[in-house]
Image (spheres, rainbow, N blue to C red):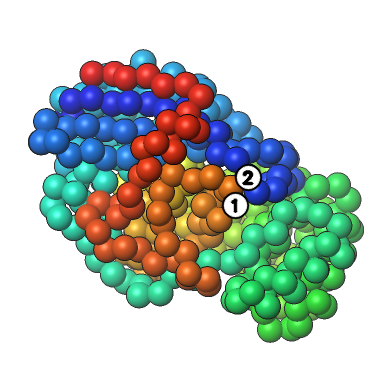
Amino acid sequence: MKITKATIHAVRFPLREPFIVSYAAYPDMPAVILRLETDSGLVGYGEAVTDEHVTGEYFLSAYEILKHLLIPEVIGENPFDIERIHRKMDAAVSGNPAAKAAVDIACYDLMGKAAGQPVYNLIGGRAHDRIEYPRVLSIEAPEVMAEKAVRAVEDGYSSLKLKVGKGDPKEDVARIKAVRKAVGPNVPIRVDVNQGWKTPGTAAAAIRELEGENLKWIEQPIRMGDIRGLSDVRRKVTVPVMADESLHGMEEFLEIVRLEAADVLNIKLMKCGGIYPAIHIAKAAEAAGMPCQVGSMVESSVGSAAGYHVVTSRANIESAELTGPLLFSEEIGDLNYELPQVLLSGRPGLGIIVDEAQLEKLTVKKETVQ
């Protein structure tokens, strides 16, 4: 089986409401959907969701990188030769993990379809039979977040993730305490600062005010390049600390382990380059005794399904936050969310059916390379 043709779609997914994190507010979610065709007639789909603030990529730059540098390297390759494909991509251009993830995911979709197996059976099988996801709340006023949190619990969500980190940390503390008071002491709450508290001193002071709130963890409280600072925060607080933006690939992973900078790791396919490198990080984390989760860059069913296959296959990946399809008012796939869990279909490859007409509707730019 050889890859013979690629179609690159730049798309914008409309959101039900703006998605607000510490460093940006998104009115819609730009992405690149990759369609790979083979000489056997099989078609595989991949996705790149970029974040200028985290990976340094813009969705149209990922589009051009795929068109000019990555796709020419993979035309004629067997998608099963995934180690070779990653080496060729890395030789063609450094960085650009989301663009590389699109190729990686499409290759795994093709592998699964060729083998007649879901992707998780190619990377370890079923380590988890049930995968739950939290209700993610954007940054808003404390009373608004509290009201939405109560509604989420009433709807059947088993855990909450709160986005904070915009403005005064004292306001974030008020947001978190308001939600905890509203939902009671036992609902698991995860807090994601998205680098917003910036410095170790500010972060440690804010976290100490939250040590009685029974939080699952505090995610990436300071800027992503400061792994030593993250280690300093962790030593000064009792709430578990998660590394997210600080963890891209194996280089950062080794530094996090060396400096004991985190209790939990957030692996994202868009940060590390796809399924293949994500599995490597998860295995290394298991050897280091560190639990992981697979997080989201707000992907569609394509990228979200890829992440859930990784979660399914690894016992030390204990949680997932891939809820992008639930945030969109229009989507292209059929990933099945039955609150509070996602159900992979068991079909070959990623296991999703892509609506080609919907993909064309949401496409703002398209190119074919062969």
Say which quadrant the C terminus sits in.
top left
Q: Is residue 65 above or below residue 119?
A: above
Q: How many residues crowd mark 1 within 10 Å: few (<14), some (14–19), many (20+)?
A: many
Q: Position of residue 117 (x, y in %)?
A: 18, 58
Q: Position of residue 217 (x, y in %)?
A: 64, 67
Answer above or below: position of 211 versus 226: below
Label 1 residue SS: helix
**Can residue 332 be seen here?**
yes
> Sequence-wise, which precedes: disc 2 or disc 1?
2
Q: Position of residue 343 (x, y in %)?
A: 39, 67
24 on left or right of 302 = right
Choose between 150 and 363: the one closer to the eye. Answer: 363
Type of the residue with mark 1? Leu
Q: Residue at x 22, y 61 (%)?
A: 121
Q: Quadrant of the N terminus?
A: top left
Q: Nearer the viewer, residue 362 or 290?
A: 362
Which image quadrant for residue 171?
Answer: bottom right
Instruction: Return the residue at label 1.
Output: 327
- Position above or below: 221 against 360: below
Q: Check disc 2 and give the amino acid type.
A: Leu
Q: Image point 76% across, 82% down: which residue?
A: 184
| Label 2 sits on residue | 15
**Residue at coordinates 52% horizontally, 28% vertically from top-left?**
59
Q: Position of residue 30 (x, y in %)?
A: 56, 34
Position of residue 205 in the picture relative to residue 30 (left or right): right
Q: Are marks 2 and 1 in contact (CB under 8 Å)?
A: yes
Tell me the CA gap for discs 2 and 1: 6 Å
